[in-house]
Image (spheres, helix red, strand yellow):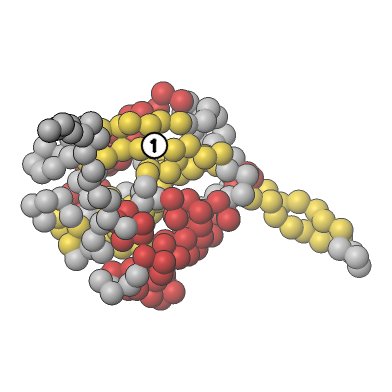
Amino acid sequence: MMEDKRWKGVYSFEDSPFIMEILTELRDKDTDSISFRKGLVKLGRYMGYELTKTMEVEKIKVETPLEETEGVVAKDRKNVVIITVLRAAIPLMEGLIKVFENARVGIISASRGKAPEFEIEMKYVKVPQIKPEDTLIIADPMIATGSTLTKVLEEVKKYGKPKRVIILGVLAAPEGIERIKKENPEVEIFVTKVDRELNKKGYILPGLGDAGDRAFGAPVKVSTLPQMHTIE
């Protein structure tokens, strides 16, 4: 894990061959949905392990069957709130919760509109109370324009002020990081890699495509209007 020189509090895992191997599989257009979901779960778990290295620990005494020795307790690991941004972050959350098994989990459904406005629509918000001792982890695979996450950050502030706020994703674009850090400089960002740029449609390049569609399949738009039948 290394801090990006362009921004304070932005970290990537480009120095981890294992995590880069998982990212390579996720990027591959021929990776099927099952393998894609499993890759996101793996990233959630292993990035969660790396996050524990940044958390406060307490030294304790423990009795082995033979003698007393020194051990540690990761205090912050027991005070975690994970916010899952639907739908693409579900596998990431699954991996994270294997590390932070005591975590309280919130869910926010946020969808981004078309370019160039990229308006955000929030349809579902269920967030637990956030306590001063908590580490808040917001899981969202793609940090593209930053518009979704700035809206999510604005919403979760209503539920309490945590000890730390962390955004955890797979890929980020410089444009998204710039926006988030400008409006929320205290937020820490952890991603596998910061990619080159956004295209005109707001997709990360080289990226890996739409993470939600690749993990769960592209949605089909069906009209909910009642069908009109003509009687002859």
Quadrant (top left/top right/bottom left/bottom right) for the C terminus = top left
* Residue nearer the viewer, 112 or 191: 112
Residue type marked 1: Ile
Q: Residue at x 27, y 60 (%)?
A: 194
* Residue sitting farthest toward the top: 158
Where's residue 141, x and y in %?
Answer: 34, 53
Q: Which one is in front, 187 or 5?
A: 187
Which residue ends up furthest to the front in the rendered image?
A: 232
Left of 74 or right of it: where is 45?
left
- Can residue 79 be seen here? yes
Which residue has dot 1 on it? 108
Dot 1 alpha-carbon crowd within 10 angstroms: few under 14, some 14 to 19, many 20 or more:
many
Horizontally, residue 40 falls left or right of residue 100, namely left
Residue at x-position 33% and y-position 72%: 31
Q: Is residue 7 left or right of residue 231?
A: right
The kind of secondary structure element at disc 1 is strand
The image shows residue 143 at horizontal and vertical percentages of 28, 50
In the displayed structure, 225 sits above or below 85; it is above
The reply to whether residue 13 is in sight is: no
Image quarter of residue 98:
bottom right
Q: From the top left corner, tell me how far across and down residue 230 is, in percent.
A: 14, 32
Which percent across, then down, holds residue 190?
38, 54
Which residue is depicted at the point 37% across and 44% down?
86
Question: Residue 92: which quarter of the image?
Answer: bottom left
Camera-nearest residue between 226 and 31: 226
Residue located at (48% from left, 37% from top): 106
- Quarter placement of the N terminus: bottom left
* Relative side of 96 to 68, left or right: left
Q: Is residue 199 above or below residue 146?
A: below
